[in-house]
Image: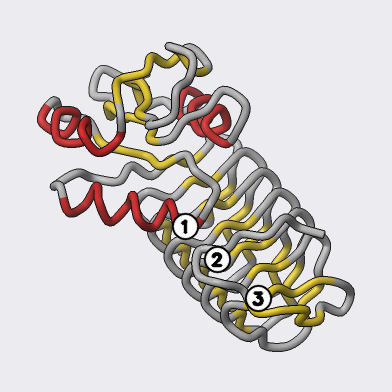
Amino acid sequence: MTCGARRVVIVGGRPDGHGRVVIETARATQDVKVMGFLDDAPCAPTVAGAAWLGRIEESIERCRDQGMSFHIAIGHNPTRRRLAGLIVALGGTLATLVHPRAIIFESAVIGQGTLVAAGAVVGPGARVGTDCIVNHGALVEHDAVLADHVNVSSGFVSGGRIRLEEGVFAGIGASVLPDVVVGRWAFLGAGAVVVSDATPHSLYVGVPARRVRVLGTDEAPRTP
């Protein structure tokens, strides 16, 4: 860790979930000091060695005033979007975290508050938006676009020039063929192979992926 390390608070860290991935990713970098975590649910006083600093909404301004930025460690896309909006509205800054064993090509762009985990690859010309998750071993190919609040799971594979619109969730091992557009807040089941444009707010499963139902607001079904 360098002397000028970014001081980052983890929002929503849990000992048995995505929070642990985020905390250990942050610690693997050379320019981040994890100051602790914020969470509204009762939990242990420490998560992966990080201290609980308080409930989320009532603690943001205090942490902001102490020069801390924020990374949201919650996999549920609608919740992450809500908290990102709250943090920014209260004058906070979203911290981007990239594991040193991820590969980010020089011409790729990574948005604020996004996590790129170990083993992930973000190819030439790719653009990843604000508050996204690119999980372990995911491949975001050349010129692909991931809009804000997208979450692609471990083993996700994209072809070139795809577009995942706002809030898309892609399950473990899902794939999207080149030039395909997946509509806003769609959910791709584990192992789904999307071969043509996908409708917003819909659940897709299978090979090739088929639409099985419309999703309600803030719904995040389990992958089949």
Q: Quadrant of residue 4?
A: top left
Whether residue 125 is visible, yes or no, is: no
- Residue at coordinates 21% horizontally, 52% vertically from top-left? 88
- Residue at coordinates 45% horizontally, 61% vertically from top-left? 149
Asked if 116 appears above or below 166 in the picture, the reply is above
In the structure shown, which secondary structural element does the residue marked by tag 1 occupy? loop
Judging by the rendered image, the residue that carries numbered circle 3 is: 160
Please provide percent x and percent y for residue 48.
53, 16
Cα distance in 3D space between marks 2 and 3: 10 Å
User: Which of pointers 2 and 3 lies earlier in the amino acid sequence?
Assistant: 2
The disc at residue 106 is 1
Cα distance in 3D space between marks 1 and 3: 16 Å
Q: Quadrant of residue 45?
A: top left
Query: For the N terminus, which image quadrant?
Result: top left
Asked if 86 appears above or below 64 in the picture, the reply is below
Judging by the rendered image, the residue that carries numbered circle 2 is: 124
Tell me which amino acid carries mark 3. Answer: Gly
Nearer mark to the viewer, of 2 and 3: 3
Name the residue nearer the viewer: 172 or 13: 13
Name the residue nearer the viewer: 19 or 118: 19
| Dots 1, 3 in contact, CB < 8 A | no
In the structure shown, which secondary structural element does the residue marked by tag 3 occupy? loop
